Each structure stands twice: as C-alpha cells, then as structure tokens.
Image: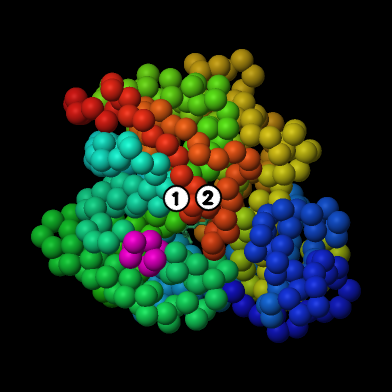
Amino acid sequence: MMGLPHIPPGRPVADGLPVMGSAAPLMRDPLRFFLEQYLDKGPVYEVHAAGRSYVILAGPEANAFFRRHASTHFDGAPIYAPYAQDIGSDHVLVGMEGDAHQALRKTLQPAFAMKALESRFPSMLAQLRSDVAALDANVPFPVRHTLGSWAAQAAGITMTGCPFHGSMRKLSRFAHVFLGAGVGGFPEFMRYLPSYRRARRAGLAFLRKHLLHAEGGASAPLVKALRQHRNTDGQGLSEQDLLANLHMPYTNSFVYVGALAGFLLHFLLRHPAALVQFRSRYDQLAGMGRTPDARALMADPFLSACLQETQRLQPISLSAPRVAARDFVFQGHLIRKGEALLIATAVTHYLPEFHSDPEQWKPERFMETGTGTSGKANWSGPVGTPPEAFIPFGFDGHRCIAAPLVRLLTLTMVGELLSAGELTDTRTGDVPLKVAPFPTVDAQWKVDFKRHPSGNAAPIRT
Ligand code: HEM
C-alpha cells in the first residue's frame, strides 16, 4: 500500500501512539478498529501506522459514495499494479482500470459464470470427496491448512481441469506472501525472501508445465478464455500475463476460500442446532454420494444464509484500497488527488441500524420470515437492508469475479466434511481470528474428526 504525499489539516486522526501510530490495533483486529474510530470520529478520518498513512472513508454514506463515483474518483491501479509486476505482468484485473480492465473482465466472465461452474461441478465434488476420504480420522486436523489445500485443489480442477501437483506447503507460502505483500499488509521485503522465491518458482513451473505446455491444458475454461483475449491494441496476452492470471484458482482459493470455510465451520461448531440443520439440508441434496445440481445447492435458503451470515460477521475483505483520482469533497472533508484511501466497506456489517444484535451469528436475518427451508436463497443481503449494508465481495467494477465459485466451493467443502463424520472443536471461546495478512482462522486451530460409516466419503454413485 502507498504512503500519503500530503494530508490537508483539519481531519480527525485515529487513536494511536507516537511513532507506531495505530499499528497495534490495526494488526490485532482491523475491522473492530475501523468501526470504533468511525463511531468516535465520523465517516472520514486519518490513520497513521508505522510510516504509512491513509484516509479512511467509512459507513453507509462512504459505501454508497464509493459505488456511485468509483470510476471517476477512485483508482486502484497504483495500489494493485505492483502485485502483478511480481510475476512480470501488467494484465491482472484488479490492477487495471478503464477500457483495458473492462475488456479483460468481459473475456474472463464466462469462465467464472454459474453456467460454467454447473458443468464442472461433478469434478469439483469428486475432488472434495477424495480429499475428505483421505483425511486421517485418528488425528485432529489443522483447519486452516486443510481447508486451504482442499479449496486450492477443487478450484484448480474446476477452473483449469488440473489439480496442483507439488508441495502444498510451498503453494501455501507462494499464495500467502504473493497476496499478502501485493494486496495485504505484509511488508515488501517478504517478496525477496529465498523461501518465497523458491515457492513462487515451483508454483509458476507447475502452471507452465501442466497448463501452458501440456496437451489438454488449452481446453481448460480459464486457459481457453485467456488465450482468446485480445488487448485494446489487438495483441494477445504474453506468457507472463497468462501465468499472472492462472495462479488465481490455486492461490486465491487457498488463502481466501480456506479462511472463509474455516470461519463457517467455526460458527457452525459454536451453534449446534444450526450445524444439525446445515448437515441435514446438505445431506438431503448431496448425501449418500449423490451428485446434486450445483444450482439446487446454491438455491438452498438455509445453507446460503449460514454462509452469508459468516461473511457479514467475519468478512475476509474489510476495505477497498484506492488512490483519489481527483480532488473531491466527501461529508465536508476535502480529499486531495493522489491521497491513499481505504474505503472501510465492512464497517456497515456491524451497525445496529442494519443488523440487530450485530455481534451475534444469526443466519435467519438472511431469510424471509416464514420462508423456512422451502423458499429460495436470498443472496442479495439481509432482508430489508440497503446494498451498502453488506459487502462481502467488493462494491464497484472490481467486485469479485469469482463470487459464485467461492460460494459453491465453500458450501460444498463444509457440507462434505460435516456429512462424512462427527467434528469436535478442540477449543472454546471467540473466533480464532488471525490477520495474516487477511482475516483467517488461527493456523494452530485443530478439530477432531470421527468418520461416519455411511458418510459421503463412501464411493460415489453417479
Ligand atoms: C472468500 C473468497 C474471496 C473473497 C472474499 C474475495 C473478495 C474480493 C474483493 C473484495 C474484490 C474487490 C477488490 C477491490 O475492489 O479492491 C475481489 C476482486 C477479485 N477477485 Fe476475489 N475474493 C475471493 C476469492 C477469489 C477467488 C478464489 C478468485 C479466483 C479464482 C478471485 C478472483 C478475483 C479477481 C480476478 C478480482 C478482480 C476483479 C476485477 O478487478 O475486476 N477471488 N475479490
């Protein structure tokens, strides 16, 4: 993220210490800090943390303003472009703006659309079932690494037709440092550590060998879409551009989907009645080795409500980092062109005017009253709230292109696990939150697993 060239006087400054500024509370729980400072200082305030400075825009007005003026007032390229350059590319969606961004997004959209996912779903399911079947039932499993690995494999199969071949530890290292130093709060020097360099080399070598140069690789949905793309100047993408996009199913899923599935599991384990209902709904659709329709899974009101309530209470994405593309005034404060901004999109997730008892995990807030389990899933947010009250996947032209993949994969992964056996949490207390560099469950958190004799780990009937 970038330093601020100049901040005009007169804006509130977030609480902090001399020199370190607000670094400690930001590292511990950034969302709580953004929220507390919003309630205390208002919708615009500055944060200084260990030599970096940002202007925070928070609350419903900020989210609505961000969406309305995204393409004219906000620029993501200066923040995200260095992330793609780590692989020698300037063609990664999140680091592009304008026509070039729209053209690449249009090319990739069909590969991430529900229609494509639907046809690939049996492969995703088969991969997850074989991973669950291989889980050692005699030792507690580490949630973060296990779910991250499964997510990477299943998303890989779905988007490219190819599971990752190689060390999962290395893939995890590549994913966490690449995304952490590029998009998150990890310091820049981590990109130069030999362990990261080795892990990145191994990851890119896998992509080259199995997706770019292997027979069959070219027919994978994502590879095909990228190969067909033409830039605004009529040129195709370079090999580095292909690599910079092809790692996403593996790396993004490892870090983000692994974390989201971990949080969903955490909340279900803390709410036994919801866990029983989740498992029963999942089993009705996919139990005993059945291969359900992906759309039927996504249409289930209770499964979708559990996932969304998890994304509300423990979002993985807390803010949108941008640079001001021009001078503008927001809520009486002048924002100068070039200033580094964080639109703290998730602050509204905790405002009681939108979500009663905001600290409580209550899936029913996403279900129409009286809908029970017979209605349709409502993916548009808690009933009766405006769009700016719940932002799990971004809010402008850069909103997550992979949202359907993330939802389908997370529900299926957790559903398969619950269906296959009995899980017992090895700890009590709050969400084992770790910000490293994105919110995730603590790497030390383990869960006991006792395989159910008739669970989905049984051979698949098609
Ligand atoms: C829990 C899982 C995930 C969450 C919460 C998430 C969230 C987000 C958010 C908030 C953005 C917008 C960033 C911004 O505006 O600054 C974004 C963009 C994006 N995400 Fe995700 N993401 C997830 C998983 C994934 C996965 C697995 C992939 C790929 C397989 C992916 C691919 C992308 C891409 C390509 C963009 C850029 C879109 C554009 O700039 O047009 N995401 N994501």
Mark 1 neighbour density, 10 Å: few (under 14) some (14–19) many (20 or more): many
Residue placed farthest to the left in the image? 215
| x then y, percent, for residue 162 | 22, 53
Which secondary structure lies at badge 2?
Answer: strand
Would you say residue 170 sits in the magenta stretch? yes
Mark 2 neighbour density, 10 Å: few (under 14) some (14–19) many (20 or more): many
Nearer the observer, 206 or 436: 436
| x then y, percent, for residue 233 | 35, 76
What separation in Å lies between label 1 and label 2 (alpha carbons)? Answer: 6 Å
Instruction: Please tell me whether the stretch drawn in magenta is mainly helix, strand or loop.
Output: helix
Residue in the picture at 32% in, 36% down: 137
Left or right for 57, reference 228:
right
Mark number displayed over residue 144: 1
Relative to 388, say whether 360 is above or below.
above
Residue placed farthest to the right in the image? 10
Q: Residue flagged by tag 1: what amino acid is it?
A: Arg
Would you say residue 403 sits in the magenta stretch? no
Stretch of the chain drawn in magenta:
169-175
Mark number displayed over residue 53: none
Q: Quadrant of the N terminus?
A: bottom right
Query: Which label's residue is closer to the chain start, 1 or 2?
Result: 1
Residue in the picture at 52% in, 79% down: 188
| x then y, percent, for residue 424 | 47, 32
Which secondary structure lies at badge 1?
Answer: helix
Residue in the picture at 72% in, 44% down: 350
Task: Report which residue position mark 2 lands on.
Answer: 441
Q: Is residue 100 visible?
A: no
Whether the residues at callouts 1 and 2 have beta carbons within 8 Å, the answer is: yes
Q: Where on the picture, by quarter, is residue 407?
A: top left
Relative to 383, say whether 436 is above or below.
below
Relative to 95, say whether 60 is above or below.
above
